[in-house]
Amino acid sequence: MNAPRAVVLLSGGLDSATLLAIARSEGLGVLALSFDYGQRHADELDAARRCATAAGAVEHLVLSLDLRAIGGSALTAEIGVPKDRAGLFDPAKREVPVTYVPARNTIFLAVALALAEARGASDIYIGVNVLDTSGYPDCRPEFIAAFESLAAVATRIGTEGVSPRIRAPLLRMTKAQIIRRGLELGVDYGLTRSCYDPDPAGRACGHCDSCRLRLAAFGEVGVPDPAPYR
Amino acid sequence: MNAPRAVVLLSGGLDSATLLAIARSEGLGVLALSFDYGQRHADELDAARRCATAAGAVEHLVLSLDLRAIGGSALTAEIGVPKDRAGLFDPAKREVPVTYVPARNTIFLAVALALAEARGASDIYIGVNVLDTSGYPDCRPEFIAAFESLAAVATRIGTEGVSPRIRAPLLRMTKAQIIRRGLELGVDYGLTRSCYDPDPAGRACGHCDSCRLRLAAFGEVGVPDPAPYR
């Protein structure tokens, strides 16, 4: 009999690389799932491929879905990525940033659900965390719970009483806690990429929200960030 | 101010062509959304384009998402489409057919939700109906209700208290009732295609589940089906 399997949503960033390692540490065979959704940097998908290989994934599926046709986000349309944004570290000042992609996590979880059903995976891992939840609606615990309820009525396996659990183990962890856990599990963060606006050589900008949160977290942990910066 | 808008999931079949006409009759500007998901017949997308044009859609977006990589269905993998299947018209004998595509309606509604948010649409129309509900888990009323609950927590507009309604006006209609309603609204069913296994010229097989349900319904209404059969 095969080992139990999990679908892991993998962007190639720090969070999802840690998520992969957590799923593996729980004895699950990993089916990594990434999306080429018209994000500005293909570099992110290269990072996802490196992470899936390093984690010994059973399968790594990269699906194309061009969300640029839908638009409405700095990550998929010609809207500038904000740099050195005021209020980033102050939850009270947070609002949904322009890097929000409409319904992205709903779409990603829906496809993960299809893959979980087709391959018989018992769990779906998504790397949302508390920092995201203050900015992005589809990173909140109530969203995760609502999706799990939907999954139970959406599929053939659901009607048979076995529906995948939606696992968000990073949900209540800070970025620094995530990095500490990943280092314990042997994650090589040099393989990961987080920048919203890298240069053509794949070097991070250091000034977008994602870079600043990452750099502050490595600073808190007290280890250098092994990813390249320009 | 623009007229209120609705996203309408459009396959190019009989149901979704009627759905488009219903949305238009309710005074909504229509944003039609179709998917090129690796279904066997591109012909279906041509039918969707004809229907969107005939209905005067504001926009018709065709998104590519290759569900063949996920597999698990006769519509997207090399599994034979069943013909003249016993028990088709007996709800007690129905089971989930091999033409079920894992989590397809979850994926389609998730993308429709993204489009509704990006374009400010108040409603999402999906053409599920009671005949489908006895076979496909993601055509049941409980699925539609669960998705509407998810939508309310999944998006920025949801956090602002305005979340699109999920409308399934065909849900409790038989195929014959759907055709009667469409004819009242002026739908040209000659533009639509329903067959799971058309020939290269786009002519329907007449023997798959979809053809048999369609032909029986036209028979019940007492008008000839204007679509081409081989």
Image (cartoon, coloured by chain):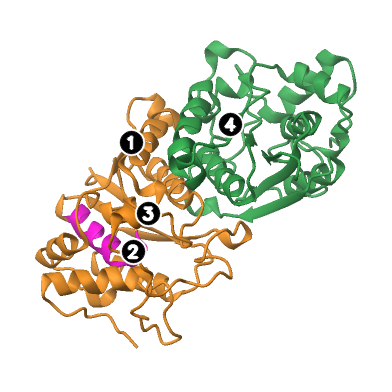
Chain colours: A orange, B green
Mark 1 or 2: the one toward you: 2
Look at the image and give the residue range highlighted in magenta: A10-24
Is the residue marked by circle 3 packed among few (<14), some (14-19), or many (20+) residues within 10 Å?
Answer: many
Rendering quarter of residue B20: top right
Q: Are marks 3 and 2 on the same chain?
A: yes
Q: The disc labelled 4 sits on which kind of residue?
A: Ile
- Chain for numbered disc 3: A
Residue at 33% x, 25% y: name it: A161
Q: Find residue B110 and report its horizontal and vertical position in percent.
A: 52, 43
Q: Locate residue B208 relative to residue A173 in the image: left or right.
A: right
Residue A224 position, x and y percent, is: 16, 80
Q: Which residue is mark 2?
A: A87
Callout 3 amino acid: Gly
Q: Tag on residue A135?
A: 3
How many angstroms separate mark 3 from mark 2 (CA)?
11 Å
Indicate the chain on which mark 1 is placed.
A
> What residue sits 22% from the left and 71% below the top?
A216
Q: Are marks 4 and 2 on the same chain?
A: no
Q: Are marks 1 and 3 in contact (CB under 8 Å)?
A: no
Check disc 1 and report the residue beneath it: A145
Crowd rating for badge 4 (residues with CA inside 10 Å; few <14, some 14–19, many 20+): many
Q: Is residue A184 above or below residue A120?
A: below
SS at circle 1: helix
**Residue A211: x %, y % from top left:** 32, 73
Residue drawn at the location 62% of the way across and 32% of the way down: B82
Whether residue B35 is in magenta: the answer is: no
Q: Amino acid at mark 2?
A: Gly
